[in-house]
Image: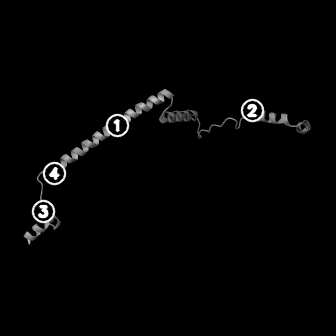
Amino acid sequence: MNFVMKQALGGATKDMGKMLGGEEEKDPDAAKKEEERQEALRQQEEERKAKYARMEAERENIRQGIRDKYGIKKKEEKEAEAAAAMEQASEGSLTRPKKAVPTGCGDEEEEESIVDTVMKFIPAPLMDMFNKK
């Protein structure tokens, strides 16, 4: 029967033995080869990380050059300045800091000037009615 199997498979009996549940051949240097392969993978990964770290450092230098040229601040710097301003404004306060009021909203003097401007356009007879009260 072995002879027929060898002829039919054309010499692939080693693989057939494994597929049929036979013993695999043990490679005496398998552990050493696996260790070398793992080390090579680690080394490749370190080289790849170093390469991308260099590339990112070069990009950051270019970005910083552009920021310096056009006077742009980094996001972290802007956020730090905003946080410092908020902290400084609410230093002695027990409540949260108030939101900044946009110009034209809530200014007493400006409201009075708006009323004066409207009063200029009111006809004289109506103006007398407002003044009598």
Sequence-wise first label, 3 or 2: 3
Q: Label 3 is placed on what type of residue? A: Lys
3D distance between C-alphas at marks 4 and 1: 33 Å
Residue at image point 38% right, 33% down: 58
The circle on residue 109 is 2
Query: Badge 1 local density, few (<14 within 10 Å), some, or many (20+)?
Result: few
The circle on residue 31 is 4
Residue closest to the eye, 74 or 47: 47
Residue at image point 36% right, 36% down: 55
3D distance between C-alphas at marks 3 and 2: 99 Å
Residue at image point 7% right, 69% down: 3
As drawn, 93 above or below 18: above
The circle on residue 53 is 1
Q: Position of residue 38 (x, y in %)?
A: 22, 47
Tell me which corner region of the image, top left, top right, bottom left or bottom right, holds residue 2: bottom left
Sequence-wise first label, 4 or 1: 4
3D distance between C-alphas at marks 1 and 2: 58 Å
Mark 3 or mark 2, which is nearer to you?
3
Please tell me whether mark 4 sits on a helix, a strand or a loop.
helix
Mark 3 = which residue?
14
Q: Position of residue 69 (x, y in %)?
A: 48, 27
Q: Label 1 is placed on what type of residue? A: Ala
Give the quarter of the figure containing the N terminus: bottom left
Query: Badge 4 local density, few (<14 within 10 Å), some, or many (20+)?
Result: few
Please tell me whether mark 3 sits on a helix, a strand or a loop.
helix
Q: Position of residue 89 (x, y in %)?
A: 58, 33
Residue 68 appears in the figure: yes
Query: Badge 2 local density, few (<14 within 10 Å), some, or many (20+)?
Result: few
Tell me which corner region of the image, top left, top right, bottom left or bottom right, holds residue 5: bottom left
Query: Badge 3 local density, few (<14 within 10 Å), some, or many (20+)?
Result: few
The answer to whether marks 1 and 2 mark residues whose Cβ atoms lie closer than 8 Å is no
3D distance between C-alphas at marks 3 and 1: 48 Å
